[in-house]
Amino acid sequence: DLDPEGKYAIARFNDLAYSTQNKTLYGNFYSDSDEWASPYLCTIDIYTGQMTVLGALSVDVHGMTVDDKGNFYAVGYGSSQLYSFRADNVTTEKYTQVGSLGGYSATAHAPMAWDHETDELFWAQAGEHGTRLLRVNPANANVEICASVSEQMTGLYIAGSTVGNTFAP
């Protein structure tokens, strides 16, 4: 049970992101407790499933990933803004608005992934004609289309080719 005390009444998880820096699984979820007013960031113990809430996010974001330095990237829901933040300052609202992703916006579930071997950010942006896999520059939010598929993608993970590069310890 992710929330054994029932404090947050989890309504829906938006995304998960694994940090290779601190070997931690993070989640972004909505709660019925505050009528979906804001998403929350939490950690999830990969062995027990125990959830620890770090705080409410002041920006409604979908799609989330974390780089090797502990920087999170996410797209503002209903917007084309790329945000960056760190888990240790989620409650102090220190978000960086990296920039606009052009005409691409997050209006549906749109997973993100960080390629830990090439240090590149990828986003599966869902639109009316399917999903576009975009390479996103984390410094300025410029995008490049890598591929298009006719269906919506609900998850995105880039497996490393290095020996010992695993999801969990």
Image (cartoon, rainbow, N blue to C red):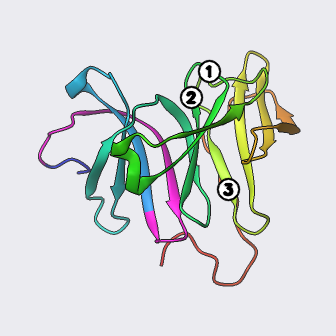
Cα separation, mark 2 vs mark 1, equals 5 Å
Residue for point 59% across, 74% down = 166
N-terminal label among 3 and 1: 1
Q: Does 91 appear above or below 158?
A: above
Residue 102: x and y in percent read 79, 25
Nearer mark to the viewer, of 2 and 3: 2
Q: Which residue is mark 3?
A: 114
N-terminal label among 2 and 3: 2
Residue for point 42% across, 48% down = 27
Residue 157: x and y in percent read 65, 54
Query: What span is in magenta?
Result: 5-24
**Disc 3 on helix, strand or loop?**
strand
Residue for point 26% across, 20% down = 35
Would you say residue 18 sits in the magenta stretch?
yes
The disc labelled 3 sits on which kind of residue? Trp
Query: Which labelled disc corresponds to residue 76?
Result: 2
**Disc 2 on helix, strand or loop?**
strand
Query: Which labelled disc corresponds to residue 93?
Result: none
Q: Are marks 3 and 1 in contact (CB under 8 Å)?
A: no
Q: Which residue is mark 1?
A: 79
Q: Does 166 appear above or below 86?
A: below
